[in-house]
Image (spheres, grey):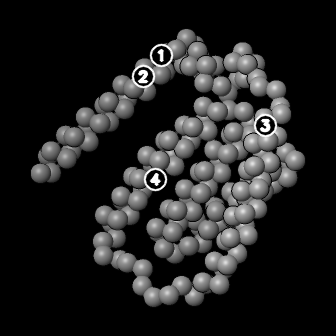
Amino acid sequence: MGTVAFVLIAGVAVGSALGLVIKRNPIHGALFLVVNLGTVAVLYLTLGAQFLAVAQVAVYAGAIMVLFLFAIFVLIPGKEETGPDPRRQWRLLAAPLGGALLLELIMLVVGRAAAPVPTAATAPGSVAAIGRLLFTDYLLPFELTSVLLLAAMVGVMLLARSRA
């Protein structure tokens, strides 16, 4: 079952990546990117890296995609979608495919419930293990990153202030 789940999730990831590259509409491309980032988060979950999965959704699929969409809307003002979609018949495939993915999700949840739960000491991708590493071994790089982000934020404020 694990191989089948991986192949299906990887297929969705590759399909959404292709959709991102092929689509001419930047908003559709951004939505395909959200799907791709979501499948990467699901792959992290299948590997047992819960923290990375949540960070993937929160940081990339959430914050970064809001930034991308904001930039698209600012750079392409007034460009709306017009006319019917010539590929409307492909939408009929969405319901069976969505049902198959829901069935796969149910099978994964049932399979995970039967599997033994790893403890924080044995799960290298768990929140406790990553938190322990961030605040012990990698404290200096963690703090330097926060100083770098603060400097970037101050720089953006100064640039925006000088243009006004």
Number of disc labels: 4
Are dots 2 and 4 in contact, CB under 8 Å?
Answer: no
Q: Nearer the viewer, mark 3 or mark 4?
A: 3
- State the residue position of label 4: 65
Q: Which mark sits nearer the N-terminus, 2 or 3?
A: 3
| Mark nearer the viewer, 2 or 4 | 4
Residue type highlighted by circle 2: Leu
Viewer can see residue 11: no
Q: Amino acid at mark 4?
A: Met
Q: Is residue 90 left or right of residue 117?
A: left
Q: Nearer the viewer, mark 1 or mark 4?
A: 4
- Badge 2 local density, few (<14 within 10 Å), some, or many (20+)? few
In the depicted structure, whether residue 111 falls above or below residue 87? above
Question: What residue lies at 60% left-to-right and 72% top-to-bottom?
Answer: 22
Between 120 and 92, which is closer to the camera in this rendering? 92
Residue at 69% x, 18% y is 120
Which residue position holds label 2? 144
Q: Are marks 3 and 4 in contact (CB under 8 Å)?
A: no
Q: Please say if the residues under marks 2 and 1 sit with CB atoms less than 8 Å apart.
A: yes
| Residue 47: percent from left, percent from top | 74, 36
Q: Which residue is drawn at the image coordinates 80% and 48% (left, top)?
A: 107
Amino acid type of disc 3? Arg
Q: Quadrant of residue 94?
A: bottom right
Pointer 1: what residue? Answer: 140
Looking at marks 2 and 4 on the same chain, the residue that comes earlier in the sequence is marked by: 4
Q: Quadrant of residue 108?
A: top right
The alpha-carbon separation of the residues under discs 2 and 1 comes to 6 Å
- For marks 3 and 1, give the CA distance: 36 Å
Residue at 52 percent across and 14 percent down: it is: 135
User: To which residue does mark 3 refer?
Assistant: 112
In-front residue for pair 150/5:
5
